[in-house]
Amino acid sequence: KMNITTPRRAAPSLRARAHRPPRPDRALAMRASPRALGKLKPRDVALLDSILSRVHASMPARSEAATAGAREEYVVGLSGGVDSAVAAWALERCGARATATLMRNWDARDEDAATDCSHRDDLKSARAIAEKLNLRLIESDFTREYWHEVFEPYVEAFESGATPNPDLECNRRVKFGALLRRAMEDLGGRYLATGHYARIDRDVDEGAPPRLLRGIDQTKDQSYFLASVRGEALRSACFPLGAVFKSETREAARILGFDCADRRSSAGICFIGRRPFGEFIGEYITPSEGAFVDAETARPVPGAAPHRGLASYTVGQRAKIGGAPKPWFVVGKNVAANVVYVAKGAEHDALYSTRAALADEFWISNRRPTSDDGSSSVRLLAKTRYASSLTPVTLSVASDDETFTKSRFSSSFVPRVESSPLRATFDRPERAVTPGQALVLYDGDVCLGGGVIEHVGVTEFEARAAS
């Protein structure tokens, strides 16, 4: 049995129970949107009532002032989408006083209108939601912070051959950094609420930070993207939809008459817009054509056109190489030689590896997880990217005499901070482990944090060839 450094659950105090927000009654659902709702069907009322009950349970214990009669102040990050809309509605119905804010992280005014981040559409939708809920809407511009703290490191990582994920850094440094500070200091909020599908466990030892839990809807769980948020920031965060299923959120939005009910969820990276990724990244990294190299023969693929620049490719994606009976897939990149390694078939052994070296680690509790027996390794679950499944892994601190054999196909992520090296060893070969992506670690449903994949160990193909 392991002893995770994240504090164990403690029994909730009677004081905490007494300071819970008042439980929403059934009539609140009926008064959800006086305009244009008409008479609700019993099943619709039941759904709204059920959502309100779960949202109520997710809200932090109330302060002394709120217990005395004042409404607790929340700032809701309103994106214009269905999730934040329903979250804002539910918080209001559960007794909170909400102010809405729409973030602007990317300035596309100097770019082609077709490549805009849809900010104008987001603003239009957010205004409609705020008007419907009678909320004050404030625009918050963090383009400067996003550029320096998220986008510049993102481009630098691509230049090193890695494939970074900007969403974790955005949540850590902008949404639950700059925006959280503005919500507390300028907008009068006590909590920042967002539409993330994740949960916060505040039932911990006194003085310990809250724990981040996976969302109930495991198909939409977003704890992976929140894994680098500091535990201290989670004290002032609220995720009303953590115990709600996405399908319920959409249905509730339709019942409530939100125009955004059927609006597509955001996917991908906001600042790219509708452009092909290669076209976008080519504006910041000068593309240099090179060869597609067959991982099996170590020679250029006969008849293949040159690749369009290393930044346009990531491990696991299909490489558009014509004339082959079986599709080619990217298995790695070499920056020095400017080549993209490819192999035939989506399940080729060159796509699978069992080890990874980690850098730039991040822990919600601000401490690495440790085992009960004091050993340097601990058994956990891991996700190598957002869409991957949880897989068993052994996390260990590398010893001075330990050697780590890097795959010859693996590019490298250049760490931003120095720390003692961590190693992740998967129980079974994992597909498309990619430098620059976050490896996020879990103890059951508890998200502990993780690190950025620096190198990938030898692939199954290389191991088999060497035996």
Image: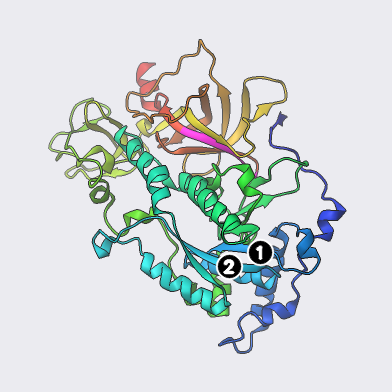
Residue 95 is left or right of residue 260, and the answer is right
| Residue located 48% across and 67% down the image | 81
Q: Residues within 10 Å of mark 2 (few under 14, many from 20)?
A: many
Q: Secondary structure at mark 2?
A: strand
Q: Does 43 appear in magenta? A: no
Provide residue 91's location: percent of width, then percent of height: 65, 67
Name the image quarter holding the N terminus: top right
Identity, as a three-letter code, of the amino acid under mark 1: Glu
| Residue located 81% across and 55% down the image | 16
List the residue tagged with mark 1.
73
Identity, as a three-letter code, of the amino acid under mark 2: Thr
Residue 456 found in image quarter: top left
Residue 172 is left or right of residue 90, and the answer is left
Q: Which mark is residue 99?
A: 2
Provide residue 136's location: percent of width, then percent of height: 55, 72
Name the image quarter holding the C terminus: top left
For the stretch drawn in magenta, the main secondary structure is strand
262 w.r.t. 337: above or below: below
363 w.r.t. 424: above or below: below
55 w.r.t. 206: above or below: below
| Residue 199 in view of the camera | yes
Residue 230 found in image quarter: top right
Provide residue 337's location: percent of width, then percent of height: 22, 26
Direction front: furthest residue:
186
Residue 408 found in image quarter: top left
**Range drawn in magenta:** 445-452
Q: Residues within 10 Å of mark 1 (few under 14, many from 20)?
A: many
